[in-house]
Image: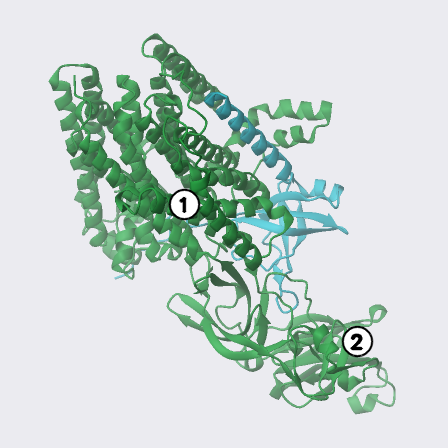
């Protein structure tokens, strides 16, 4: 068997495997409306934390139960339950990806990813409020 | 504009910019000069190139020197320095503030490129000098353009490292920027913001320079390869490139793993590798470079083998570094990645640089003459299309054109051998191994690049949508939303592909050194491999016994076996064939290191054990939900079983910028039970009828006849019952202090604390904890908390438990004793407070008088509890209560996670061995090159 064939076969196999794994393992990205329309199926819902509502986390009651409101891409605000301890920096997050499903009319997330102002991000340093000291 | 600012080093800003501009201009001159010198016999072009390079290098070194001068002088009027430095940083971190941001990163990268280029020039480059240095000139000029800081309307060309804060766009036009005395007047300029505290770590001093040296070291093989294509001498460059390529393998590999060590040690990722885009995009060039370096080795022994693949791998080593810079610095990952990346405003420039580098490579692969002109024309047209028409479609077109160009170059230009190597030769298996590593790189790149691929899918969105509607294909719908992102399950996303690939290429490293170049081995090599294979099988058996594996983990176990075989066979090779000639053992040593790295990574990750589970609480915890599998709630002073230990949260204290949580660990001793003691096990109660030491499991403890089942427990027994446990806290073992960094800039961040053992690490970090006492009024009462309570509900308050024992309507006879009027309606809640003092019973009333609620506050001052009933829902027999707790009785608590990583030290050990081995073989290659001088210059 010629080398070239081996390479081509390998690459094609890996590419196919990759595509397959990406498309099968990826949870579909939807908005709340769709997740509620198809309860029991795992989806990814992206959105932002709605700061008008408090983040409820009481470790004395349950270490792995965090409740908060998230606004999805359609602008719908929905209370969600995250079955994890409150992630560090939730309040500072810029956007949230929730992985979970609707059970009994409630969106229950088992996993969550946050986009946070991280070490790679430098906020703009405006000195707009800088005022020369008197005297 | 001509304001003379007092105390500002305006001259330094001007000088710095002048130096960058000079470097840019002389870089252009160097590129032109060296380029012409490749084909011209006229010495003048060569001299122009050389002088251009000298001036460029001098200007860049001076700019860096000036930059350090500004840093050491703490010149906070400069934006970069104000952002990344402050007066409290230690000398090491002052040094590191140089590469705290992108501008400094580019400078650092260029610094190493220059150093390596100078080393190259010192080593008698011969006729490779002109083409290699022309490429260097071009790349360095491109990188310098990232620092120009010029604005054309809204278009920004480069980020100016010497930008003064008053000139920064966000401050433009503010009144203070016109004040000549602003430095003295505005207090913000007295000190800088400082490096983000998350980065204030000694790894920040050594990791970025190492990684940048690794990045820089991929350029030399790339430039040599382009020189080979350019001069159509496909052999000379390869001989020179071997040691450069392996140098890159050593340094880049070490740099990547240092990043892992940093993440493991200081950041609470929960491990050393998170398949994060930043990590991935530095790993991928390394994989390509390793493949390329091995293909170069093949070409040493059998010139002319797999020439296209060699060019491709070496080319990709550098191009993927540029791509990684593009991914992490352009902000393109920002849309879908969970990490934030800076959109520094130079995306178009980074993209142009990346595409130019790729196009240059593709064009040089083509045969010289008409092909290069034609393809160059198409690419230029598509380049214009990116700006003028649809960027995504044109970039896609450009990439396809490059693919076709490389294919055409392979068929029409590059030499190919007809001679097929026999199966059992070293070069064949090295080639296969290299290609497998490349396949692994393709897969990781694909996953990391999904945000980029989404951009390419976008133009076809409508088409996929129609396809979905006509066929109902779910796949088409996914593609139509163009919102692909790598999954969160690493096993499915990465390991499912990477583990089998790694199994194959690690296995290849186990036996390939035993083969010979060019011909089948005279005698079967099986015999010389037998003993190492047996050793590996025995070791794998031990691993299987120590750490339980399940059937679905078979690929993983196979990979562990391959790693152990590779480590032992390479060690055996040094004994059998090299007979301990260490100077030739570089490759074997590097392979041993590589196998150990993979072994440590796979085992520690696959068999990591989260031991922080709420399993047995003490009495206070009995009512709590035990659903949690990962996090442990620890109340101050409680001692709780956790894995093989008992842990106690002792105290919180603040030290510098850290809140430290001291957690004591105790060994577990067998529990002892006394006659009459009552325990609960799985809901049943038992009473001990003899003093005894507990057996490891309850069933055996029960069988040995120490316990009597209590069919109907009385009140006292129910209250006394504790969960049965085989252990009790034994002697003190050690203390760990996971921290929360108080970071005003980025928000508080947890930092782990790890106990290291030779064969495992115990890694702990805080998931939730208070960094200061909660707010309370002057009498120490904290904000009240609302609770809905039914009969038999109970709450933990400090060290006590508040239970609602019963509910009763207040009868007419009782009313006077409560001071109620006859017309009042009242319901009484009978509470009992137990623990931390005598049992106290008290009553709180829900009173309605003339349909108004009369608040009834019950205060137990000495117990630190206040209760008020705000409502009563008769249907559910539920009180709506507010309960206040006094700081004096409050117990602090934390939610902690503890993970055991087995054999993770092999990973770090392997990294050292691999780097050492690779550097040894660089030295060896270099010696060999000197012994056999380069082909005579015509």
Of helix, strand and loop, which one carries label 1? helix
Image height check: is B223 above or below B162? above
Mark 1 falls within which chain? Answer: B
- Identify the residue at horizontal 30%, vertical 25% (top origin): B225
In the figure, residue B459 lies in which quadrant? top right
Relative to B497, is A82 on the left or the right? right
* Tag 1 residue: B594
* Tag 2 residue: B791
Quadrant where the N terminus of chain B is found in the figure: top left
Say which of A21 and A105 sits in front: A21
Coordinates of residue B155 in the picture (x, y in percent): 37, 30
- Identify the residue at horizontal 26%, vertical 28% (top origin): B239
Quadrant where the C terminus of chain B is found in the figure: top left
Residue furthest top as drawn: B370
Chain-order first, disc 2 or disc 1: 1
Relative to B21, is B489 on the left or the right? right
Disc 2 from disc 1: Cα separation: 63 Å
Say which of B279 and B848 sits in front: B279
* Mark linked to residue B667: none
Say which of B505 and B768 sits in front: B505
Q: Colour of chain A?
A: cyan
Q: How is the image coloured?
A: by chain
Coordinates of residue B4 in the picture (x, y in percent): 18, 45
Image height check: is B346 above or below B341? above
Q: Colour of chain B?
A: green
Say which of B299 and B672 sits in front: B299
- Identify the residue at horizontal 54%, vertical 63% (top origin): B897
């Amino acid at each position: 068997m010629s080398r070239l064939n081996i390479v081509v076969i390998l690459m094609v196999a890996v590419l196919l495997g990759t595509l397959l794994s990406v498309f099968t393992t990826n949870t579909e990205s939807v908005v709340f409306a769709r997740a509620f329309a198809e309860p029991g199926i795992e989806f990814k819902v992206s959105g932002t934390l709605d700061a008008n509502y408090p983040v409820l986390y009481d470790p004395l009651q349950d270490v792995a139960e965090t409740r908060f409101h998230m606004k999805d891409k359609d602008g719908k605000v929905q209370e969600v339950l995250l079955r994890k301890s409150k992630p560090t920096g939730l309040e500072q997050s810029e956007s949230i990806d929730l992985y979970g499903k609707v059970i009994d009319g409630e969106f229950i997330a088992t996993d969550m990813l946050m986009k946070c102002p991280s070490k790679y991000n430098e906020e703009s340093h405006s000195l707009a409020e800088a005022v020369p000291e008197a005297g | 504009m001509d304001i003379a600012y007092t105390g500002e080093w305006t001259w330094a800003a001007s000088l710095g910019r002048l130096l960058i501009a000079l470097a840019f201009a002389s870089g252009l001159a160097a590129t032109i000069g060296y380029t012409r010198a490749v084909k011209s016999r006229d010495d003048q072009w060569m001299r122009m190139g050389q002088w251009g390079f000298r001036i460029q290098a001098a200007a860049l070194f001076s700019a860096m020197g000036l930059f350090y001068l500004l840093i050491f002088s703490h010149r906070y009027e400069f934006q970069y320095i104000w952002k990344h430095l402050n007066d409290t940083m230690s000398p090491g971190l002052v040094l590191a503030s140089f590469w705290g941001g992108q501008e400094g990163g580019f400078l650092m990268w260029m610094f190493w490129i220059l150093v390596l280029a100078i080393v190259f020039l010192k080593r008698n480059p011969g006729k490779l000098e002109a083409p290699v240095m022309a490429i260097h000139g071009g790349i360095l000029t491109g990188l310098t353009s990232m620092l120009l800081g010029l604005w054309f309307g809204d278009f920004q060309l480069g980020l100016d490292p010497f930008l003064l804060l008053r000139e920064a766009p966000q401050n433009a036009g503010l009144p203070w920027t016109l004040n000549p005395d602003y430095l003295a007047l505005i207090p913000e300029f007295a000190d800088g913001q400082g490096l983000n505290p998350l980065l204030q770590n000694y790894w920040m001093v050594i990791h970025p320079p190492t990684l940048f040296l690794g990045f820089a070291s991929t350029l030399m093989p790339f430039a040599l390869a382009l020189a080979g294509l350019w001069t159509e001498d496909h052999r000379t460059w390869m001989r020179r490139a071997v040691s450069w390529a392996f140098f890159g393998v050593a340094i880049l590999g070490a740099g990547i793993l240092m990043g892992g060590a940093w993440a493991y040690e200081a950041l609470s990722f929960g491990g050393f590798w998170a398949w994060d885009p930043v990590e991935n995009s530095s790993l991928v060039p390394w994989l390509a470079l390793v493949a390329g370096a091995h293909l170069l080795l093949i070409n040493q022994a059998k010139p002319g083998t797999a020439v296209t693949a060699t060019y491709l791998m070496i080319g990709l080593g550098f191009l993927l570094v540029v791509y990684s810079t593009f991914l992490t610095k352009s902000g393109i990952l920002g849309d879908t990645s969970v990490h934030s990346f800076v959109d520094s405003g130079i995306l178009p420039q980074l993209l142009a640089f990346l595409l130019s580098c790729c196009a240059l490579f593709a064009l040089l692969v083509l045969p010289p003459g008409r092909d290069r002109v034609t393809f160059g024309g198409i690419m230029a047209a598509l380049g214009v299309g990116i700006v003028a028409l649809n960027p995504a479609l044109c970039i896609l077109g450009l990439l396809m054109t490059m693919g076709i160009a490389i294919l055409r170059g392979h068929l029409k230009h590059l030499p190919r051998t007809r001679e097929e190597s026999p199966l059992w030769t070293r070069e064949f298996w090295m080639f296969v191994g290299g290609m497998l590593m490349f396949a692994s790189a393709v897969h990781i790149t694909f996953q990391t690049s999904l945000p980029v691929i989404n951009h390419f899918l976008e133009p076809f969105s409508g088409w996929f949508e129609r396809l979905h509607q006509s066929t109902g294909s779910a796949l088409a719908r996914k593609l139509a939303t163009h919102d692909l992102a790598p999954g969160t399950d690493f096993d499915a996303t990465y390991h499912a592909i990477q583990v089998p690939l790694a199994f194959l290429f690690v296995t290849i490293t186990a036996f390939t050194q035993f083969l010979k170049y060019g011909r089948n081995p005279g005698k079967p090599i099986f015999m010389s491999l037998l003993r190492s294979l047996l050793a590996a099988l025995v070791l794998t058996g031990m691993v299987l016994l120590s750490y339980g594996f399940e059937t679905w983990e078979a690929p993983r176990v196979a990979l562990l076996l391959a790693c152990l075989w590779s480590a032992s066979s390479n060690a055996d090779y040094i004994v059998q064939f090299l007979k301990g000639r260490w100077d030739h053992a570089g490759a074997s040593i590097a392979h041993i290191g590589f196998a150990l790295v993979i072994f440590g990574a796979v085992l520690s990750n696959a068999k990591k054990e989260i031991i922080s589970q709420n399993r047995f609480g003490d009495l206070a915890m009995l009512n709590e939900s035990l659903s949690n599998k990962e996090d442990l709630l620890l109340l101050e002073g409680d001692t709780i079983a956790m894995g093989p230990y008992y842990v106690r949260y002792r105290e919180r204290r603040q030290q510098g910028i850290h809140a430290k949580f001291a957690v004591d660990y105790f060994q577990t001793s067998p529990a002892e039970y006394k006659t009459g003691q009552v325990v609960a096990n799985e809901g049943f109660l038992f009473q001990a009828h003899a003093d005894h030491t507990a057996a490891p499991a309850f069933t055996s403890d029960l069988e040995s006849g120490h316990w009597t089942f209590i069919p109907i427990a009385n009140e006292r027994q129910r209250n006394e019952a504790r969960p049965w446990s085989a252990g009790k806290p034994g002697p003190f073992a050690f203390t760990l202090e996971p921290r929360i960094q108080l970071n005003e800039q980025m928000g508080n961040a947890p930092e782990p604390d790890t106990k290291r053992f030779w064969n495992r690490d115990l890694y702990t970090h805080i998931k939730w904890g208070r960094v200061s006492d909660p707010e309370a009024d002057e009498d120490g009462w904290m904000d009240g908390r609302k609770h809905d309570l039914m009969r038999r509900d109970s709450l933990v308050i400090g060290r006590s438990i508040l239970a609602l024992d019963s509910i009763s309507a207040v009868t007419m006879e009782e009313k006077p004793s409560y001071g109620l009027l006859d017309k009042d309606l009242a319901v009484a809640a009978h509470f009992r407070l137990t623990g931390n003092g005598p049992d106290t019973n008290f009553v709180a009333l829900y009173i309605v008088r003339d349909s108004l609620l009369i608040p009834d506050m019950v205060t137990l001052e000495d117990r630190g509890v206040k209760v008020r009933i705000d409502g009563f829902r008769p249907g559910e027999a539920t009180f709506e209560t507010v309960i206040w707790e006094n700081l004096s009785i409050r117990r602090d608590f934390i939610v902690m996670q503890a993970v055991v990583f087995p054999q993770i030290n092999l990973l770090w050990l392997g990294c050292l061995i691999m780097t050492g081995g690779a550097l040894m073989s660089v030295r060896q290659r270099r010696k060999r090159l000197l012994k056999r001088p380069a082909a005579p210059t015509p």
